[in-house]
């Protein structure tokens, strides 16, 4: 039985927690019991075996047998749930995903921190993962905080003996457990004069913790006084802090730094209350000026469509009669341009257009609004308000953190105040998706960095999501002259187009000229047999196989969020699944197998090594974006793990698949087609273990450049032969002999000068000012090279 079938009667979300089935009312305690049951059963399974062999039902106590039967219906069904849980944990970035989705604990880019009292409230997947580390330890008595590392298979146990009594308790020791090597590492801070300390204690515990309210009140007061910088308010282990963060870490992350910082502010903390040093007065908020935020100054005068609206247009989400509303429209540039394109458009802005009525529209744009609102409550309300106005699609765009927090001049709340007195909240890309999904209870879809869309209709959203993994196919060519086919070719063209697009025979109601075809041939199958007489049947099987691969990539990736039930797909997609796979159960099973196999980097390395497409490096494979859909489906799935949540870098030209680390790199070469050796403009790397994103721009005089362009594309690419001829010429001239020396523009120019060569268009020529003697030497070397080959 497939997971989707189990979900029909006892569905569970992708965070592996059970949720009540439709029509079933379960209270919080019942759901907690169900999660405890899954956790308990998963512990009985042997690790990393698929399927994991569980002990038989008869070996459980009678009371537990009854609970299993009443909850799941059968022991086989609960085994499927446990299989699903262990399958998720086998994936390379599973812990990063579960940590990011957790509603309990303190989240940082590379870790989740949870108080020991809250462990039993976590997702069963995290509980199971943490229980494996306890099997390596003999004793964790006295542990206060458990740290789940999201970028490596490590769990840390942190000791804060004064957690309850000290407003900012000091770390006395830490224990690191490597689940892969089973090695232990300890750090002792007990005798340190300046140990790391904790901030925001309420984030580590659950709301029912005895002192939760007291901890939260202290944090709120510290935020109002500007005492905390949210990104680094917690400091646990020196080794986990990046170089760029150490400056702030030294400021408030240690006991001495924190005390000195408080002294400069003229305050101290007593019994979880802030006290002014002068006059010994509590809550000195009146002595610290709160910055004035001028939100309207963040509005831009646009000369063209904003990037989010342009992306939605390019995605064909606007139809002829689509209405558009811009929530927070600023100067109204997007409204003007959408009206020019013929769409009914309006907008509202609290400063520039406060009297315009709020009205529902098919597509609503919330572009770069939530990142300029300093109040978290108002920020959330803006997102909710825009969603309430949305009939079909909501666009949400926000500024994404690209290592530039230092542009602001004042840390405030969870962002910075710029030198124009505007507020900017810089999101991590994954953080933005989680925020949208949690506030609106949806599954948003990335269009680009910092741009997401949310569909009101779930089926339409799934159709759009699936369409992004559809390969571009062409109809098999007519290879045999058959009179019967020639007689009926105009009538059969719609059928040829349909099968070429969907990879299957249509069902009743899917073709406009269905009546004419059925009147002539009786059935679609008989009509298609006539087409097969004039074409190669193997070509049609290739079309069907490509569509199967497209669906498997989509279904495998849907497992990371919430794989829809069959009924949640449109009728056309349901017909595709039945025609291509026979059943949804079979399609999901195949997708899960493919996803499971991707957990091994050796499999990915083999796919890269054996790929007939792309430029092979020692530790990676580079492929042009146009060739992505023609790769092995496992490589498409590997890349999909990056773009499903984060989207691709705008203008991505080359995708690099790394085989030593689970990492995808997107490279933007704006002049790929026209420049014989295009310069790299921007690079974006995504670590699949924790979805951490790293950007780098190259705007200096010596950027990296690209050689051998034909290696990245397929022979069908328009300029393939032009690129290939240039490479052959360069090899003949010896220009590519020292590849390391020509990786940058200046290195390449030097190489051309040494060889008395210049490139015009995509051809190599002798330089007109070349030294005659030097030219003779080079010609001689070229002749020698040709003889060797």
Image (cartoon, rainbow, N blue to C red):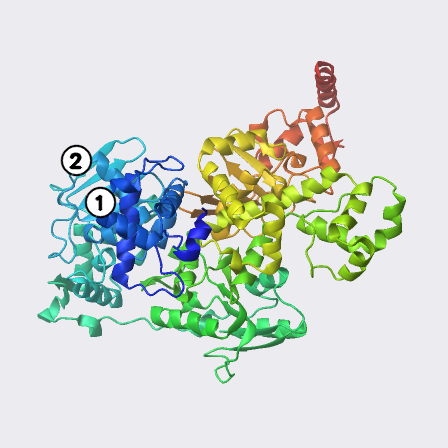
How many numbered marks appear? 2
Residue 22 horizontal/vertical position (percent): 41, 63
Residue 721 horizontal/vertical position (percent): 75, 36
Please report the residue visible at 65 percent of the width from the left and 68 percent of the height from the top. Answer: 319
Q: Up-down: is 620 above or below 110? A: above
Disc 2/disc 1 C-alpha distance (Å):
27 Å
Query: Can residue 760 be seen at all in this image of the molecule?
Result: no
Residue 254 horizontal/vertical position (percent): 20, 50
Q: Are marks 2 and 1 in contact (CB under 8 Å)?
A: no
For residue 573, side relative to residue 484 (left or right): left
User: Foreground: 291 or 715?
Assistant: 715
> Pointer 2: what residue?
138
> Pointer 1: what residue?
61
Q: In the rendering, which numbered label is found on residue 778?
A: none
Please report the residue visible at 72 percent of the width from the left and 53 percent of the height from the top. Answer: 498
Q: SS of the residue at dot 1?
A: loop
User: Foreground: 292 or 358?
Assistant: 358
């Amino acid at each position: 039985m497939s997971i989707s079938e189990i979900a029909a009667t006892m569905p569970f979300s992708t965070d592996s927690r059970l949720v009540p089935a439709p029509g079933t009312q379960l209270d919080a305690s019942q759901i907690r019991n169900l999660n405890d049951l899954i956790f308990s059963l998963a512990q009985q399974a042997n690790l990393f075996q698929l399927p994991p062999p569980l002990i038989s039902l008869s070996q459980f106590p009678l009371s537990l047998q009854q609970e299993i039967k009443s909850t799941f219906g059968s022991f086989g069904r609960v085994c499927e749930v446990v299989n699903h849980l262990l399958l998720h944990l086998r994936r390379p970035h599973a812990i990063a995903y579960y940590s990011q989705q957790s509603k309990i604990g303190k989240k940082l880019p590379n870790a989740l921190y949870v108080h020991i009292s809250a462990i039993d409230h976590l997702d069963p997947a995290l509980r199971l993962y943490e229980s494996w580390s306890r099997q390596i330890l003999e004793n964790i008595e006295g542990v206060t905080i458990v740290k789940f590392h999201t970028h490596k298979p490590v769990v840390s146990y942190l000791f804060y003996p004064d957690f309850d009594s000290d407003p900012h308790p000091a770390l006395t020791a830490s224990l690191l457990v490597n689940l892969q090597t089973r090695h232990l590492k300890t750090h002792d801070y007990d005798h340190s004069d300046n140990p790391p300390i904790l901030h925001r204690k309420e984030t580590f515990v659950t709301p029912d913790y005895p002192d939760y309210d007291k901890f939260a009140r202290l944090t709120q007061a510290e935020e109002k006084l500007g005492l905390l910088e949210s990104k680094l308010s917690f400091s646990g282990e020196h080794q986990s802090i990046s170089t760029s963060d150490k400056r702030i870490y030294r400021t408030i992350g240690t006991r001495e730094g924190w005390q000195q910082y408080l002294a400069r502010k003229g305050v101290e903390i007593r019994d979880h209350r802030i006290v002014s040093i002068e006059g010994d007065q509590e809550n000195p908020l009146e002595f610290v000026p709160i910055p004035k935020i001028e939100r309207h100054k963040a509005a831009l005068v646009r000369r063209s469509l904003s990037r989010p609206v342009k992306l939605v247009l390019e995605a064909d989400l606007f139809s002829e009669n689509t209405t558009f509303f811009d929530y927070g429209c600023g100067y109204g540039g997007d409204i003007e341009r959408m009206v020019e394109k013929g769409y009914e458009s309006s907008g509202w802005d609290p400063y520039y257009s406060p009297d315009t009525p709020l009205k529902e529209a098919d597509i609503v744009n919330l572009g770069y609004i939530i990142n300029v609102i300093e109040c978290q409550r108002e920020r959330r309300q803006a997102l909710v308000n825009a969603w309430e106005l949305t009939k079909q699609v909501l666009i949400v765009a926000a500024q994404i953190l690209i290592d530039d927090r230092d542009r602001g001049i004042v840390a405030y709340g969870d962002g910075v105040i710029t030198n124009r007195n505007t507020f900017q909240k810089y999101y991590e890309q994954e953080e933005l998706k989680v925020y949208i999904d949690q506030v609106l209870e949806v599954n948003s879809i990335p269009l680009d960095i910092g741009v997401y869309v949310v569909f009101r209709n779930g089926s339409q959203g799934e159709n759009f999501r699936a369409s992004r993994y559809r390969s571009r196919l062409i109809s098999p060519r007519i290879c045999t002259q058959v009179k019967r086919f020639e007689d009926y070719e105009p009538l059969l063209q719609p059928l040829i187009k349909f099968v070429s697009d969907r990879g299957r025979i249509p069902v009743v109601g899917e073709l406009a000229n269905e009546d004419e075809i059925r009147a002539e041939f009786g059935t679609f199958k008989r009509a298609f047999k006539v087409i097969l007489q004039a074409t190669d049947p193997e070509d049609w099987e290739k079309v069907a196989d490509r569509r199967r691969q497209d669906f498997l990539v989509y279904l495998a990736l849907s497992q990371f969020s919430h794989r829809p039930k069959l009924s949640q797909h449109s009728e056309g997609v349901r017909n595709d699944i039945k025609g291509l796979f026979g059943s949804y159960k079979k399609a999901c099973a195949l997708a899960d197998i493919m996803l499971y196999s991707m957990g091994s980097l050796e499999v990915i390395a083999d796919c890269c090594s054996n790929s007939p497409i792309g430029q092979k490096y020692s530790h990676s494979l580079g492929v042009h974006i146009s060739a992505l859909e023609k790769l092995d489906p496992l490589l498409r799935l590997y890349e999909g793990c990056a773009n499903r949540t984060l989207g691709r870098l705008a203008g991505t030209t080359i995708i690099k698949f790394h085989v030593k680390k689970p990492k995808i790199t997107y490279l933007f070469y704006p002049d790929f087609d026209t420049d014989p050796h295009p310069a790299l403009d921007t690079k974006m790397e995504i670590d699949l273990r924790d979805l951490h994103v790293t950007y780098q721009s190259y705007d200096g005089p010596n950027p990296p450049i690209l050689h051998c362009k034909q290696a990245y594309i397929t022979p069908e690419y328009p300029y393939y032969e032009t690129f290939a001829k240039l490479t052959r010429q360069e090899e003949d001239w010896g220009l590519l002999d020292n590849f390391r020396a020509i990786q940058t523009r200046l290195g390449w120019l030097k190489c051309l000068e040494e060889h008395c060569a210049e490139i015009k268009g995509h051809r190599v020529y002798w330089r007109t000012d070349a030294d005659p003697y030097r030219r003779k030497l080079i010609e001689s070397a070229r002749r020698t090279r040709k003889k060797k080959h």
